[in-house]
Image (cartoon, grey):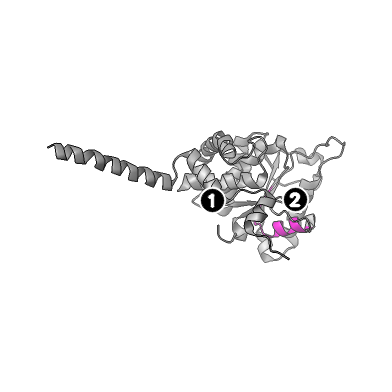
Amino acid sequence: MKAITLKTARKMRGTIPRIKVRKVVAAVYGSSSQAAEKKQRTQSKTLVGKTIPLAAAR
Amino acid sequence: MGKLSYNDSVFINCPFDAEYNPLLYAIIYAVYRCGFFPKTALDEDDGTANRLDKIIRIIKSCRYGIHDLSRIEMNVAGYPRFNMPFELGVFFGAKYLGEESQKRKNALIFERDKYTYQQYISDLNGIDTKAHENNPAIAIRKVRDWLKTNSKRRTIPGPAIIDKEYHEFIGKLPAIAKGLGVEPDNIPFYDFRTFVEESVREKLI
């Protein structure tokens, strides 16, 4: 008999994978550590991007 | 999530119907936010398992139990709902007749109005029940105070913090449900628990 995979079992029970819930909750709360880290990285890049032309202008 | 210990587990003996959801949601959130794990008869979905065996197994695995006797009125067919008082009786039986660890069991017994139980279960006379008055904020405070008093854990936040975070969660719940393709008015209990777990985690990281 073919074994049921975890994914199939979830589909049968109708439950949502936890990682998916985690992502949606983080997006709704808008403050997950991953999101915050990404935001910080983006801000750093933006700052660097702005600094270089200013420095070059001098 | 690691293995759940007996001391962290709370048996939830409450009605599971739409009308009771505001209280159930508040109780479940408070239990999670206090650092405990709620267990219910809905946790296992095995058609081959005997319902009573399942309930006994869950009761045995929980040190704490929240029992709500506020909804034992007649149903539409004219019969009272005896599941909650019956499961409270099993919980009492485990505490007084069970092995050593079972004797540490502790129960929070809810009613709508205090001491009305004396009119339908006089055997409980002398038991200190708590009234939630159908108010989720009161239920949160009673659950929090009871867990704090009995576990003595310093990590349990004050009732105002839990209440504030709960309201924030309830405000975001429709968006969470919609984001996962679940109807906000019809969230399966298993999914609701996962939403609470992840929302509490989100607040704590």
User: Which residues, given as a range, are shown in magenta?
Assistant: B53-66
Q: Is residue B119 visible?
A: yes
Q: Is residue B109 above or below residue B105?
A: above
Mark 2 packing: few (<14 Cα in 10 Å), some, or many (20+)?
many
Q: Pick whichever, B89 or B129, lies toward us.
A: B89
Q: Pick whichever, B3 or B187, lies toward us.
A: B187
The residue marked by circle 2 belongs to what chain? B
Residue under the point 14% across and 36% down: A57
The residue marked by circle 1 belongs to what chain? A
Is there one chain holding both mark 2 and mark 1?
no
Reading the image, the residue beneath label 2 is B88
* Mark 2–mark 1 CB contact (< 8 Å): no
Q: Position of residue B167 (x, y in %)?
A: 55, 35
Q: Position of residue A48 (x, y in %)?
A: 25, 43
Q: Is residue B34 visible?
A: no
Among all residues in the image, which is located at the extreme right?
Answer: B78
Residue type at mark 2? Leu
Element assignment for label 2: helix
Mark 1 packing: few (<14 Cα in 10 Å), some, or many (20+)?
few
Magenta-span inclusion, residue B203: no
Q: Position of residue A54 (x, y in %)?
A: 18, 37
Residue under the point 68% across and 34% down: B134
Residue type at mark 1? Ile
Q: Nearer the viewer, mark 2 or mark 1?
A: 1
Reading the image, the residue beneath label 1 is A19
Q: Pick whichever, B20 or B181, lies toward us.
A: B181
Element assignment for label 1: helix
Magenta-span inclusion, residue B64: yes
